[in-house]
Each structure stands twice: as C-alpha cells, then as structure tokens.
Amino acid sequence: MTDRPHTGPPRMADVATVAGVSMKTVSNVINGVDKVSAPTRQRVLSAIDEIGYLPNLSARNLARGRAGVIALVVPGLELPYFASLAGKVVEAAERRGWLVLIHQTGGDAATERAALEGNFAQRIDGLIVSSQTTGPEELAARASTVPLVMLGNRAFDPGTPHVDIDNHGAGKMAVQHLVAGGCRRIAMIGASSLLAPAPRTQGFLEALQEHGLPLRPDLLRQIPENTGDAGESATEDLLECVDELPDGIVAITDWVAQGVMRALLRHEVRIPQDVAVIGFDDIPYARTYYPSLTSIAPDRRQVAARALDVLDRLISHPSDRVEDVEARAPLRLLVRESTRTPS
Amino acid sequence: MTDRPHTGPPRMADVATVAGVSMKTVSNVINGVDKVSAPTRQRVLSAIDEIGYLPNLSARNLARGRAGVIALVVPGLELPYFASLAGKVVEAAERRGWLVLIHQTGGDAATERAALEGNFAQRIDGLIVSSQTTGPEELAARASTVPLVMLGNRAFDPGTPHVDIDNHGAGKMAVQHLVAGGCRRIAMIGASSLLAPAPRTQGFLEALQEHGLPLRPDLLRQIPENTGDAGESATEDLLECVDELPDGIVAITDWVAQGVMRALLRHEVRIPQDVAVIGFDDIPYARTYYPSLTSIAPDRRQVAARALDVLDRLISHPSDRVEDVEARAPLRLLVRESTRTPS
DNA sequence: CTGAAAGCGCTTACAG
DNA sequence: CTGAAAGCGCTTACAG
C-alpha cells in the first residue's frame, strides 16, 4: 500500500502521485479527453486500481457546472408499468453516468406541473416525464428550459421531444391477432371518442375495416381513467347492455384488461373460449394472471435507452433541432392464454 | 429583478448580496445551524424567494465530504413488491435530503455481493438492501464500512441494523384469520423446514396448536423460490398428492399466492368457498386479482421511514451501538375476496 | 450574531 | 503530451 499524506478516500491527486503523472493526465485518462500514450494510460489505470480510486462526482459536477442528476417523473412506483419503466430508465442512465431522481406525482396535476417546470428539491440537468395526464396544453404552458423528453402514448405537438410507440400500428396489431384467432365481434374498452379517435383507436377501426368487420358503436367503450376498476365496470356495463356478447376484447392497457377479465370471470364467461382478451403494455404481472394476458408492448429497455439518447443530446447540444429528436420503439406481440391462436 | 454580476443560476453569494448579509448567515438560515434573528432570517428567505435560489448540492456535498446519495439495492423494479418499497424509500429519502441510487441486482448473487461492498459507479453515503438471498453469512463476509440497513423478512445476526416485521406474529395472524373464517385444514405454501422453522412458519405452527388443529406435514410445502411459478407447481403437487383438500392456504408471499390461486382455479376449486387463500406483502396488484387477495403486510411507508431513520443515525453517528438500531413495523391485515369472513 | 478566508476534489484554459 | 493554478459554490473554523 502506497502511503498517502491524506486521510479519507483516495483522490485524483493520489492517483497522480502513484502513477507519477499530473492530475491533468489522470483526468484525461478518466474522461478520455486528450490523447494519452498507451503506457502512461496503463500506469494511471493501474494506480487507480491499486489505491481503489473512485472519482468524487460532487467535485466533478461542481467543476463542470452540472448536477449529474436527471429526474424521472411518473405517477407512482405502485403502478407496475411505471415501476418497470423506471427500472429500465435507471439502468440506462447508470450506463451513461447519470443519477436518476425518481419523482412520483401520485397523478396529481399540480405536482406534475411543478415537475414539468423542473421544481425539485435539487437542481437537475434534464427531465423525463411519463404521464397519462400531461398533454400538449400543459407542455405549451411550460416556462422552464430544462431539457425534457416525454414518454408514453399521448399525442404531442411536433416540437416536443418524445419517445413513443406506433400506437396506430399497435391498435391494428391487436385486432389482427384477435381475428387470426377467430374473433369476429370485437369490442374495445378504453377507446377514445369516435369524433377524434386517438391513434390506437384509429388503428383498431382501420383493422376492423380491412377485415371486413362492421363497426359496432355499442362495443366501443370509453372509460374515465385507465384503471382496473374502470375496465371492470365498463365491461359489466357491456355485458348487461349488449344483446350478443363480443368474442374478443381489446383493452387499452393491461391494467384495464385485468378489470375486463375480472368482470368476465365473475359472469362465468370463459377466457379465451367465449371471449378473448388482449391488452397493451406487458406489465410484469400480465404473465401471471389467470388466464395469463396476451399483450402488445415495446421493449421497455429500448424505450428507456432511446429516451436517454435524446435527453443526452438535448443536454449536450441545446440548440439541436427538435424535429430530430423523436424516436419510436418497435412493438412486440406477447401471446399468452387470454387469446386463441389460429388453428 | 436585482441585477447580479453573474450568469447562470443564482448562488448563495447572490442571496447574501440581495439580503444584505454574509454568506455565513445565508448558510445558517438554510441549514438551521446557528441562531439567526427573526428579521434577518426573513430578509434572507425573501431574497431566496426573490431570486429563485436553489442550493447547489454538488458544492454542498463536496464541502461536507458527503456524496448526498444513498443506494437502495433490490432484485428489480419488475417485482411489484420491491417497486412499491422503492417508491416509499425514494419519498422518505427526498424528505431527508437524500438522493436514492436504485440498484437492481436481478437476483444475481455476485452483483448483490458487490453491492453490499458498496461497489457502485459512484460514492454513496449509505446502503439499504432488500433481498431474498442475502443472509447472515453474506453479511458476515462484508468488508465495507459503508453504513448498511437491511430490509425484509430474513433472519439476521443481532448486530445487523435492520428494519423488519414481526414475522412470527404475521404467521399467527394468517392462521387466526383463516380459522375465524371457518378453516380447519390449513396448508402453507413456502413453509420453511420444520427442522429449523423460520419465524413465519413458527408462528403458523404455533397458531395451529393454539386452535387445537393437528399439524399435517403433507400440507406444508417448501418451494425453491418465492415466485408465482413455484407457488403454482407446489399447489398442483399438493392437489394431486393429498387425499383431502385443505380448506385454507397460507402462501409465503402474495406473488406465491397468485400462483396458488392459478393452480386452484385451473382445477376448478372455488376461492374462497372451497379453499381460502391468504398471502403476505400486499403487493399493489393483490387487490386487483380475481378473486382479490387477502394479505398481511406492514405499512411500507413506515418501513421506509424507519429504515431511513436508522440509516441517518448510522451515517451521522457511526459509533452508535447496533442494538439500538433495529426497528419493527406494525402489521395490517387486509381482508379481501380470497378469504371468508366470520359469519 | 457577522465577515473574510480556507478548503472540499474535481475540470480546464493556459503556458510550456 | 505535462504542470501549475484558477475556479466551480458551498461549509466551516476562526477572528471579531
């Protein structure tokens, strides 16, 4: 052990002493700024290893004028979808040297607005927001200049950096899968208004048409919020009001789908024999429901990685044109017990 | 707007200028160290408000010799139990001025060991570990001196700071609830070995005895890991091997309970009419299963708050006696559809 | 209570 | 490529 005239954890100066170089060189090796000759580089790396040096990020960030922290704003980690997403974001951020401040709004609009403005207990360098309630209006009203990336399936103005999935395609994909399994009367729980159909509903409608299936307005149900409870009561309602049962149900999210399945099971409707059910998001528990739930979802790891790519870019080059900073994650269909496969 | 000879976000020096005091006084007001006269204090607070000052935590932490970061080590945010726990820890930490580095081990033993040693990409001031796999042996082998608080239902050596629930009491409570609902043949999925029963199993056994119910070894099932799959196959096994069905099942976790319910439903066993099911943890989705799951769990907010109390203490007073740093969170029984209530 | 100043451990022009 | 030094924005003895 080389003795250092210093108590406490090793500092960059200690590395420099051990390696017999200047701090500048150590810094160069660590941050890969200037070129360092291979042998020098090796000596520095050995010294780092020998004394167990770990950069002091407080000092680094102070010198760089950064916080080293990005915030992830979600309704809450109680919701498996956001929890899983947060896990992927944390991982992707760790790889890029960011620390993630997870901020839970509890779905509260005021809390969310404050978060959009970057009002946290600490300074942050950037912001990722995944929310059901933030839309174009809220974003237009934003005053903060903290770089922001939106996540999720809301429609945004063209100028908003966001990572999204192909919702139109997802809606089509759901119908196609149900039709392939033999469904002909397909309902949608959590559809948007037909007057201004959201992309997923649009895809749903388009696929019906492509397969020559009639549009039955009474099988399209709007719900006040995308929760299990809302899905359950909408399905109860559907079961009572409709003269003939649907043979397939597209639920706007997996969570809603679970409510749908609860209602069906309570009415002793068999899944998928009587009614097939498909959701979106692939929440962790979709695969452990009974029956397990077929779902359409992007690879969340990819969503997180793209969001961080975009955010990194916005932080490093604030002047980048926003048109370039949209990204779409590819979709996967995860077939499980709640739907029939083509025979 | 007061003009400042400075670009970038306002600094403490700017607050001092505006308030007409020294930086020391501003610091005193913010950190509440020395007494500051009420009028001075007011002037400082107004100045902070006026120029929108937010302390630079990198600078503060650098000066204090802290990282300002604690790590939370969990298997993964895909698991609703740990996700929910992480949410509570993040909230409790935010209130105390800590930033939480969430580290997911994926259940990997080597990754977990590295985390126990505090080997992260960044320096941390303390560590909270919630894990199914870390036990007394791993902790005894620990070399790091980074303050650590363990969370969860494992048995630890007396010297380990940890926040726990009364597992023995939880086991008893589960049986008592089932018995109150009329159950007489009670099984346990995820029991520990009878040779060295863990507290929860012990409580289970004790409660059986207190109610004069015989111990039926074939109704006690060990499982390799606490997952839905393991619970499902153990229950399948139980249903096939046993001559008479149990009328109540205690599952070691809610996740396991879900597997139990899957197996029961598949065999067209009615819940709770034929078999009542109770789990532990109150994972977010327990209440949306069909049938919704009765569960015993602590208030996770309290668990998180206590863990941070303990960790705060360990960080501030490293010499504190460890006997003082254990904490137990009170239990709640959440009665739902999967069990019968006393008639 | 207040002020001037050193120091935390980095990064980064700047001069060699 | 290297070195000496200023500066990031705080905290905290220290002298008043």
Image (spheres, coloured by chain):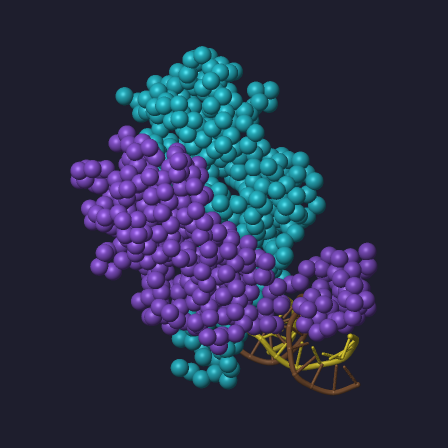
Chain colours: A purple, B cyan, C brown, D yellow
Question: How many numbered marks have been drawn onto this rendered protein structure?
Answer: 0
Task: Give residue B89's position: percent from left, percent from top.
Answer: 48, 49
Q: Residue at x 55, y 32 (%)?
A: B225
Give the image quarter of residue A41: bottom right
Q: Residue at x 62, y 67 (%)?
A: A59
* Residue B78 is at least partly visible in this image: yes
Front-lying residue, B258 or D16: B258
- Quadrant for the N terminus of chain A in the image: bottom right
Q: Is residue D5 left or right of residue A282?
A: right
Q: Is residue A74 left or right of residue C6?
A: left
Give the image quarter of residue A64: bottom right
Task: Give residue A313's position: percent from left, percent from top.
Answer: 52, 69
Q: Is residue A6 left or right of residue B178?
A: right
- Quadrant for the C terminus of chain A in the image: top left
Front-lying residue, A324 or B165: A324
Q: Residue at x 49, y 45 (%)?
A: B78
Task: Give residue B171's position: percent from left, percent from top.
Answer: 47, 26
Task: Give residue B185's position: percent from left, percent from top.
Answer: 42, 16
* Residue B93 is at least partly visible in this image: no
Front-lying residue, A85 or B6: A85
Q: Residue at x 28, y 30 (%)?
A: A268
In the displayed structure, B18 sits above or below B212; it is below
